Each structure stands twice: as structure tokens, then as C-alpha cells.
Image (cartoon, rainbow, N blue to C red):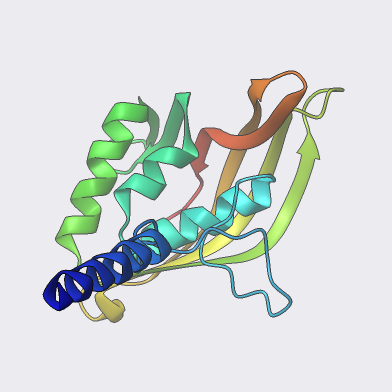
Amino acid sequence: MVGRVKITQYTVYTIVLVLMFGCVNPFAPALSKGDKQGQLILTDQETPEAVLKNFSYAYNFKDSLVYSDLLDSSFQFIYNDFTTDPVTKDSWGRDVDIKTTVGLFHHFQTLNLEWGGTIFENFLNEEKSRKEIKKTFTLTFDGGELIPTIKGEALFIFKKKIMGTLPDTSSIWKITRWEDLSRF
């Protein structure tokens, strides 16, 4: 009888511990609306600026799942093709961009993306559901030892997506276009 009571107490303690900590993943990045010190890890993507914060997180921590969640299904990446003479513009869609970015993440041991100043930003429609932002950036590969640090400009176009149904709607922003304006 005493043995059964101890087993039951241990079972109860185990169940309580599982319920208390079972839904917490200590290895997952925190998702937060903000704190007073500004030390966010990930944002809810409630603004285009928050999307860019997640963008730098994805690069710096080489997190392809976070990165893929930033891109709208209509996403286009536009870049200068320096292998042609004269230099031409080229582009690819979301799937190729994710595959290319995953390759970038696997190839380098460390990446460091830092956003610089905002050159301009403006809404593209009256509903304020599309916004363009042009920013400067610095991207360093493996501490800058073999590949020089890239300093450039990027033009982003964001689209606000409504989530949920009325009256419980919320919105997030996604990137629909990224134009790399870097010059080498």
C-alpha cells in the first residue's frame, strides 16, 4: 500500500512538471511584442520594420524557417548580374530565393547582417497596405576574412496580409519584392 502511494505521488509530480514545462521549447527563439530594453529576438511582423528585424535575425542565426516566413508567395528578388557585360538585372521568385538562401546559410560559418540608415520609406497606396523602404546594409561573411564585407542598399516592398476572420483579425507584413542595389 505504501509503495502504491509513492508511485502515485511521483506520477502526479511528473504530470504536473510535464504540464508546466511541456509546451515550452527552450531552444526556440522568443516571440515578443517588445520589451523596454529593445532586446527582441523575433517580432510578430506587425510592421515592415519588424519584418526587417526578423530578416536580420534569420541571416545572423542562419534560420531558413524564419526567413521563409518573411516572404510573400508573390515574392521577387531582383539583382544586378555582374557576369554580363554590360551588367544586367535578373530576378527569381520565392522558391529559388529560399533555396539559394539556404545554400548561403550552409556555405558560411557565420553571417552578420546589420541594417544601416533608412534612405526613404513611403506607403504605395491609400489603404497603407503596401510600403516601400530603401535601407543601407552591411553583410559580413565569416568575419570578413576571405570575402570582403558587402556594403550596399536594398529596396524592399512589403504587403500587409490580414489574418483571421472578422471580428478577430490581425495583420502581418510580408516582403513581396527585394531589390539588391549593391555595387561591387
Q: Residue at x 60, y 49 (%)?
A: 44
User: Do we see residue 66 in this rendering?
Assistant: yes
Based on the displayed image, in which of its 4 quarters is residue 159 positioned?
top right
Against 12, is 155 above or below?
above
- Residue farthest toward the front in the current orientation of the protein: 1
Q: Residue at x 58, y 48 (%)?
A: 51
Q: Position of residue 180 (x, y in %)?
A: 47, 45
| 24 or 17, nearer to the observer | 17
Question: Quarter holding the N terminus?
Answer: bottom left
Q: Position of residue 73 (x, y in %)?
A: 44, 23
In the image, 137: left or right of 11? right
- Residue farthest toward the right in the current orientation of the protein: 126
User: Do we see residue 184 in this rendering?
Assistant: no
Question: Quarter holding the C terminus?
Answer: bottom left
Q: Position of residue 63 (x, y in %)?
A: 32, 55
Q: Residue at x 42, y 65 (%)?
A: 20
Based on the displayed image, in which of its 4 quarters is residue 40 positioned?
bottom right
| 70 or 104, nearer to the observer | 70
Against 1, is 77 above or below?
above
